[in-house]
Amino acid sequence: MSPHATSPLDFARLEQASALATQLRSELAKAVVGQRSVVDQVLVALFAGGHVLLEGVPGLGKTLLVRALARTFQGAHARIQFTPDLMPSDVMGHALYDPKSERFHIRQGPVFTNLLLADEINRAPAKTQSALLEVMQERQVTIEGRSFQAPTPFMVLATQNPLEQEGTYPLPEAQLDRFLLKIDIECPAEDEETELVRRVTEGKVGDALDVEAVSAVADAEAILNLQQAAARIRVDDQVLAYAVRIVRATRTWMGLALGAGPRGGIALVRAARASALLAGRSFVTPDDLKTMALPALRHRVQRSPESELEGHSTDLLLRGLLERVEAPRT
């Protein structure tokens, strides 16, 4: 173990944290049909104290997932629908002048919540997209020269439509790098889609899925304790070096025009720690890194023009890279 590492989790605390993580997963399954890997990756991001970019066509339950997750720990949640005319002040808040008191009052925006759903973030221009940067990175908002702390825990879950859809703008690279994970949501399997249609249509008016079946199994303090537990999951020096090798390989890998920077390695290790906690282990394995490599790195690399012409996806290139980078035998 590195001499700078924090003390590892004791067995009792590990068991307690792992049991709570399993409870959160089980409660989410009551509302979200299928999408097991998506649920697990969102929980990993929550435990790691990171933000998530969700990409997928409309109607796959992204809003439902946020509502259900907030309900599991009695957290506050808010939703912002990003549109081409959305202003930064609509996201962060603004100062209002009160003629009676002859003073300015601060009206806080929807970012002052525990879970923020930034819906269709790539439908807004870069100026408004970038308005999220400060609160995502610094966990605070500056309004009229005054700083306001965001609540804890705080997590942004931004949804993004595929860029080939009309009226979308690519996110700035600096903002993409602020997301711990990018999760691709695929259409459900046939049996899961059948169950989804049954739940929505059976004896109900409208097409909304409710979260009444989801129970609160934690509170905000318990989530913060889970984050502290994840940060203390042990990472052997060989495993850490393996994570760095994966990230460095993206910078020279054939088919990638742009590789991941150092923040990619940091994100990969943070996510692997949270993944190990979700699995009930006190240490990270090379398989944890492999499991989290695609969601942690796919938005930090860019394909070369040749790869795009040949139809090679980013995930395909990263899988090929993972097969070639030697893993430690632990």
Image (tube, grey):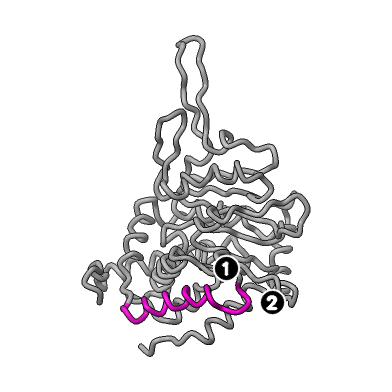
Q: Residue at x 32, y 67 (%)?
A: 16
- Which tag, 1 or 2, sits closer to the chain's start? 1
Q: Is residue 253 magenta?
A: yes
Q: Residue at x 40, y 74 (%)?
A: 276
Q: Could you tell whether 52 is left or right of 279 in the image? A: right
Q: Residues within 10 Å of mark 2 (few under 14, many from 20)?
A: some
Residue at the far top in the pictured view: 100
- Asked if residue 247 is positioned above or below residue 158 in the image, the reply reads below
Which labelled disc corresponds to residue 258?
A: 1
Q: Residue at x 65, y 58 (%)?
A: 61
* Residue that label 2 marks: 312
In which quadrant of the rendered image does the N terminus lie?
Answer: bottom left
The image position of residue 193, as x and y in percent, is 71, 68
Q: Evaluate whether residue 22 shows in this view.
A: no
Quadrant for residue 5, please give it. Answer: bottom left
The image position of residue 13, as x and y in percent, is 28, 67
Marks 1 and 2 sit apart, C-alpha to C-alpha, by 15 Å
Tell me where the magenta segment starts and ends, as one range.
Answer: 236-256
The local secondary structure at tag 1 comes to strand
The local secondary structure at tag 2 comes to loop
What amino acid type should be assigned to the residue bearing mark 2?
His
